[in-house]
Image (cartoon, rainbow, N blue to C red):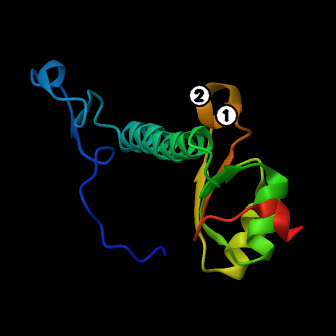
Amino acid sequence: LGNDPPSITSYNTFLVGPSNLGPTLPPTIGHIVSTSTGDIYDYFLKRKSAHTVSEAEKLIAIMLSDIAKGQTAIVSTGKKEAATAFKNSLLKKVFVHESMGKFINAVRAEGGVEVVVITGLLEELGQFGQYGGLVFELFYRADLSAFG
């Protein structure tokens, strides 16, 4: 948790400065015309946010697929369910909106859970925002209602 070595990703690889290559680059490689460090960092944050939202939406897709198959989901949403999973040490990874600061601080203080904080307006965060800005993965399939 937090000790992963730097690596090349789809959100941190981009061309900086004026270039004729910009329009021909694949979507996995970004391009920003500005050379201002502030603009570059803002562009990086925008790409990283889009990447983390897409990762959260992949978890939501897994959850919906499990539900459609009639299985107990390994992914869930909701504050009450997240608190239950956290209290019972079932929480593996959580994508959470920045507005839930109390929950973020509690989970980080305990340690052992990968916390990904997503910034931005919930209504602009697609499916992640529609599900309340909180999606989490459990260590194993469990009916959280049985844990109280």
How busy is the neighbourhood of tag 2: few (under 14 within 10 Å), some, or many (20 plus)? some
Give me the residue at 53% from left, 46% from top: 56
Q: Is 55 situated above or below 144? A: above
Disc 2 secondary structure class: helix
Horizontal arrangement in the rendering, residue 16 relative to residue 113 (left or right): left
Quadrant location of residue 121?
top right
Give me the residue at 26% from left, 27% from top: 33
Q: Is 41 situated above or below 23? A: below
Quadrant location of residue 132?
top right
At which x and y percent is residue 59?
A: 53, 48
Is residue 137 visible to us here?
A: yes
Quadrant location of residue 31?
top left
Disc 1 secondary structure class: helix
Q: Which quarter of the rendered picture does the C terminus lie within? A: bottom right
How busy is the neighbourhood of tag 1: few (under 14 within 10 Å), some, or many (20 plus)? some
Look at label 2 and name its amino acid. Gly
At which x and y percent is residue 38?
A: 43, 42
Look at label 1 and name its amino acid. Gly
Give me the residue at 80% from left, 75% from top: 87
Q: How many labels does the image show?
A: 2
Q: How far apart are marks 1 and 2 (CA)?
A: 5 Å
- For this orientation, the residue located farthest to the front is 70
Q: Mark 1 points at which residue?
A: 129
Q: Mark 2 points at which residue?
A: 126
At which x and y percent is residue 61?
A: 52, 39
